[in-house]
Image (cartoon, helix red, strand yellow):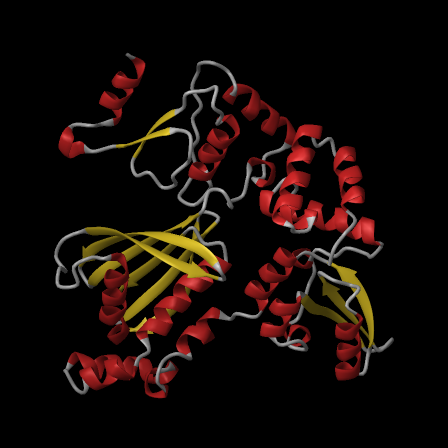
Amino acid sequence: MNVDPKKIVEELKRRSISPEEIDKLVTESEEKKIPLQDVLASRHILSDDGLGKLIAGIIGFPYVNLEKTEIYGDVLEVIPENIALKQGVITFQINDKTNKIKLATVNPFDLEMIHDIEKKTGREVELYYTTEQNIKNIIGKYHHELKHIFLNFLPESLRLGEIKKSTQETKKGENKEDAEEEIPIVEIFDSIMLHAYRHHASDIHIESTRENTVIRYRIDGVLHKVVAYPKIVHEPLITRCKILAGLRIDETRATQDGRIATKLDKDNIAFRVSILPTHFGEKVVMRLLVDIQESINLVESGLHEEDYVKVINNASKPYGMMIVTGPTGSGKTTTLYNIIKLLNSEEINISTIEDPIEYGIEGINQVQVNHATNLTFANGLRALLR
């Protein structure tokens, strides 16, 4: 759906976006031959909610933020997930009294799609506009009961009530190789990465207990248990991780670090992998490294407007110190990198000392700490200040 770029520009001016920034956005839209609203979405000039309201106001349809709306699973199932993602449409409410169904879509002018849904459901459609990202988020939240998805990969003999029994049998060595061959480890591991990305997890933890392999995601700094597999899954799962990360699969007594590069939902994603031997088996922690150019910016980071202004003003001073603290996954690295992005220009020399360098940024000097060569934070700082 194309929206009149002139009207978008007018709305951006009302929102105090600088003329220089608007010119850059328009130029990018024209050069890449993509709609201006898509450029806005990719550049995170506005929050997803703010962009949705802007576009809805221009095209004259009510806007709905699906993440703030109570939606039941059976209502979502009216439209299959693959079609919902492909066409950018989702049903979110049914009113039996009025025989109407509420439909959120990225293109309310798609009359053929609307007619098909009315024909399929036998209900009158009420149209709402929403963003593509909003639809992806809600599908990730409601369409994926992860525990059931992951367990459904397993052979029937290893599911639910059979898990404990199967684990005990494999301890005795009964049919262990046959059982392992039945488990689709590649599909399981790929699914673990995919759903972590869709649920905006910062880390994946794969841990071994006495009888299970536990998968946990860290979301907004808090670990959430996703699923517990039978112990027989653990060794093949760790091996798969080592292969993708380029690590030694025969080394089980020492720590190992590596990196996995993959494509998830058409996005290039990397994971920093750390493997640690524990009493019940090796533990894996995978840190999700999203391209910093596409990551959330300070406008959307949750800072109040007053705090945002303070951060920008202080970061722009010629000297001083800023300390960013918080638990794992709370956004410390993202915040610092985005401050650097804001400051980065040809007129300024920017150097960083990092361990590790999680994102490469063009135009700055990034130094990787190396204790083997005595390149520590302290020595690096001395060199920079000489």
Q: Residue furthest front?
A: 31
**Placement of 23 over or under 203, stated as above or below:** above
- Would residue 58 appear left or right of 218 to someone viewing this image? right
Residue 5, position as x, y percentages in the image = 76, 45
Q: Quadrant of residue 215?
A: bottom left
**Placement of 6 over or under 2, stated as above or below:** above
Residue 270, position as x, y percentages in the image = 37, 52
- Would residue 339 appear left or right of 49 to someone viewing this image? left
Count numbered badges in the picture: 0
Q: Residue furthest top?
A: 386
Residue 170, position as x, y percentages in the image = 20, 81
Residue 154, position as x, y percentages in the image = 36, 80
**Placement of 221 over or under 125, stated as above or below:** above
Q: Quadrant of residue 158?
A: bottom left
Residue shown at 34%/57% (left/top)?
Answer: 205
Q: Quadrant of the N terminus?
A: bottom right
Q: Quadrant of the C terminus?
A: top left
Is residue 210 among the parts visible in the rendering? no
Residue shown at 40%/29% (left/top)?
Answer: 364
- Would residue 44 appear left or right of 346 to someone viewing this image? right
Nearer the observer, 28 or 263: 28
